[in-house]
Amino acid sequence: MSKQLCLGGFMRPVCLHTAWWRHPSAPANANFHWPTIKSLAQKLENACFDAIFTADHLALMPMPPAALRRSATVTSYDPLVMLSAIAACTEHIGLIATGSTSYEDPYLLARRFASLDHLSNGRAGWNIVTTVNPEAARNFGLENALRHSDRYARAEEFFDVVTGLWDGWSDKALTMDKESGIFSDLEKIRPLNHKGEFFSVQGPLNIARPVQGWPVIALAGASEGARDLAARSADLVFGNARSLETAQQFYRDVKARARALGRNPDEIKILPACQVYVGATREEALAKKRYMDDLVHIESNIPNLSIRLGVDCSGFDPDQPLPELPVTEQGQGNQREWVALARREKLTVRELAKRAAESGTGELVGTAKEIADQMETWLMNEGCDGYIIVFHTVPDGYDDFITMVVPELQRRGLMRTQYEGNTLRENIGLPRPISPLDK
Amino acid sequence: MSKQLCLGGFMRPVCLHTAWWRHPSAPANANFHWPTIKSLAQKLENACFDAIFTADHLALMPMPPAALRRSATVTSYDPLVMLSAIAACTEHIGLIATGSTSYEDPYLLARRFASLDHLSNGRAGWNIVTTVNPEAARNFGLENALRHSDRYARAEEFFDVVTGLWDGWSDKALTMDKESGIFSDLEKIRPLNHKGEFFSVQGPLNIARPVQGWPVIALAGASEGARDLAARSADLVFGNARSLETAQQFYRDVKARARALGRNPDEIKILPACQVYVGATREEALAKKRYMDDLVHIESNIPNLSIRLGVDCSGFDPDQPLPELPVTEQGQGNQREWVALARREKLTVRELAKRAAESGTGELVGTAKEIADQMETWLMNEGCDGYIIVFHTVPDGYDDFITMVVPELQRRGLMRTQYEGNTLRENIGLPRPISPLDK
Ligand SMILES: Cc1cc2nc3c(=O)[nH]c(=O)nc-3n(C[C@H](O)[C@H](O)[C@H](O)COP(=O)(O)O)c2cc1C
Ligand SMILES: Cc1cc2nc3c(=O)[nH]c(=O)nc-3n(C[C@H](O)[C@H](O)[C@H](O)COP(=O)(O)O)c2cc1C
């Protein structure tokens, strides 16, 4: 079989574009309206996506009020609650929930993902995040988030506890023999007795080993800490690459780290997130993008400009050129670059803010053929093993991709036309971890 | 409308009888087999039960290995994962999940129950427990469970944080005005800024106020701490009464406490848990009970005897009379009583252990008419406002109750024949809490 793309659909929030909910087609409450969520999930399954992906940030997003009140992110479901419900009305698609190693508890998290894996018959995935959102810390008794290195030290230990709990059950632990009345073989259910820097967890878990052995493990992050943890532990690595060249650098780096740890690099899949605008013609696709971007109010764009420039831009007149700026320390090193851009192209504050706000993910804009071309190029040239597709609005963004791009990818043999495996691991081509009790 | 019973079905574990899984009709894996769980939930909904109830203990149950290996409780779903899936394939029935105030986190718990409430369109309930199982502590970094009084102090604060987070959203917070681009009115979404003895939680929650204002609040426990918390906070109170007289004492006490706090005592419902055996004749019902109890191996009964006698009975010969016992301090005050019983009735260890193991809940055994009679008597005489029904096996226990007792209760007007309200609160007849932001 030829090489295929591994495709995840970004579904929580339903879209990342700031203005998605203002689109005429969009039910503005889609993020917390179950019938909408259910129908989107079923669309992705009918289109043979590998998995649904759900992000999580554990607090309101850190935006100034003028931007926050314009953001649909203020209300959406807990990822596991949402995916458990989706599990009940789908049969094949994978279900990847973000779970924070900084603020969740490992025993509860291990049990919840094991539950979802049993309930969905082997379709669960855990996206490990350390949660960067600084607002989150204050919802969990801390003044500030942990330091970056502590976050990853905690994440490593958290991962070991969770997988250790899953491994504490042999696949053969349950005898369920009505005749003798023996339900389980306790020799095959072992306590973990973990005592570490961050956690003490006795175990065992009170649910059997997941159908997949371990749910699929996903991870995002570009830092050294994130790459090391990914190389050691992740099946899927999410990225954000904007050009083939930077994508290749990331791809080769993560695969090399995995290889150095003795892993088969084919068993760690790199999936950049990518927002897609597709049209019958390139112009139509570009018009869709322009339409969406024009729906974004300047109050939503200004915070991005403030970040780029390291100064609060909320008081600036949007229709005047950028004023002279105080030199600051906090600027992310690129204040000079952005000022130069504004002067060179004679941009107003409004125009500059729009540039600063370009979607945080990569973008693909064009016809189905153009988009498939680029996906194929990246897939064949160590740019990626697939994508997390980000839709620009609901339901149009979903429908555009599914009716235009998916058939083109299927025609080229880059995407399945029906699910071949039973579990998410089988569909992606990942091995099933064996418990030490079964070795 | 005449007075009706409020009925919950105990579904996690699917049954409480130690030997339920050995019954010939039972799928032994029912506790973690989704198609079975789904069909049981749908049966309860078709029978117009108010709610599904799910317990939780956050560890393997504290039994000696000889008993533990015979127990089907070793593996079952996380309650919220299970109920979220059930929400997706039911329409009316309430969904009550146990959530621990000792080991869960209030921000996450508040968000998960709010998510379930939105997803199910107003059917969520939270059973507040402090988690007595001593094994649980060691899964969460503690050597021992908190002291009883600390557990309830923490539970009170936990409850205030969770309800405070739900109340931080006005019902009118979401404007979602596509024209202006304003999604929410931040004046109507307030941080909590809670700083207490156990928790510091800033808020606000990143999900809108639950459909029911607050999910239904349930609570179990007989201690002073539990009764006080129930009187202040619970909509439903689960109990364990064995006789009408003790039931009435509990009923009147809890209602009096609620009244003393200015609450309407009709808005706090007392629901004892009750295991039911029903047959076409009384003999048939008794035979079912005997059949089930005979399926329990002595190794499962011995731990209960050890608890009653305050000594480890695992070494005793089951077919001999009770040996002379060392007098102990730890006995729950009733060693003397149990020894006297054994001597008086000349019971073997096996026979005595069986008596000690009588189900932890109350029991009703008889014809549908007899069972309905007793339920009606308790309902009309301040014994209860309804029951949590515990089924003796799967699916027979469910089917027996639904095909025999439910029609009898419906005929008497003690149970609905179709759901009248949209939410769990509406179906039970509970008011919807108003946020201070909307007063
Ligand atoms: C596709 C994708 C999805 C992500 N989802 C989340 C998320 O749900 N929650 C979160 O806190 N961070 C999320 N992140 C951010 C990463 O987890 C990570 O924190 C970030 O990339 C910075 O990490 P680093 O400083 O280690 O590079 C996501 C990143 C990507 C590329
Ligand atoms: C119907 C019913 C269900 C219960 N479910 C749970 C449960 O799921 N988890 C738990 O830890 N305790 C459960 N309990 C126990 C109570 O929460 C409580 O801890 C126990 O009654 C002792 O509390 P007390 O010492 O305050 O009286 C349940 C009790 C009853 C009657």
Image: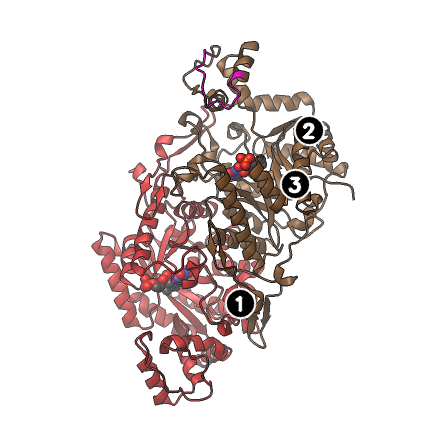
Chain colours: A brown, B red
Tell me, yes or no, whether the highlighted magenta stretch contains residue A335. yes
Which x, y percent locates residue B22? 55, 73
Query: What is the CA distance from the residue labelled 1 to the residue labelled 3?
Result: 52 Å
Which x, y percent locates residue B172? 37, 35
Chain letter of disc 3? Answer: A
Tell me, yes or no, whether the highlighted magenta stretch contains residue B198. no
Check disc 2 and report the residue beneath it: A244
Check disc 3 and report the residue beneath it: A257
Query: Which one is earlier in the sequence, the residue at label 2 or at label 3?
Result: 2
Which x, y percent locates residue B358? 41, 76
| Residue furthest left as drawn | B260
Q: Decide if residue A193 is on the left or right side of residue A397.
A: left
Where are the magenta residues, as a range? A323-336
Say which quarter of the image contains residue B337: bottom left
Residue B260 visible to the viewer = yes
Query: Mark 2: which amino acid?
Result: Leu
Query: What is the CA distance from the residue labelled 2 to the residue labelled 3?
Result: 20 Å
Check disc 1 and report the residue beneath it: B395
- From the viewer's side, name the closer residue of A364 and B435: A364
Q: Quadrant of the C terminus of chain A?
A: bottom right
Query: Mark 3: which amino acid?
Result: Arg
Disc 3, SS: helix
Q: Decide if residue B82 is on the left or right side of residue A175.
A: left
Query: Mark 1: which amino acid?
Result: Pro
The residue that appears at 44% across and 38% down in the rendered structure is A145
Chain letter of disc 1? Answer: B
Which-is-in-front pick, marks 1 and 3? 3
Q: Mark 1 packing: few (<14 Cα in 10 Å), some, or many (20+)?
A: many
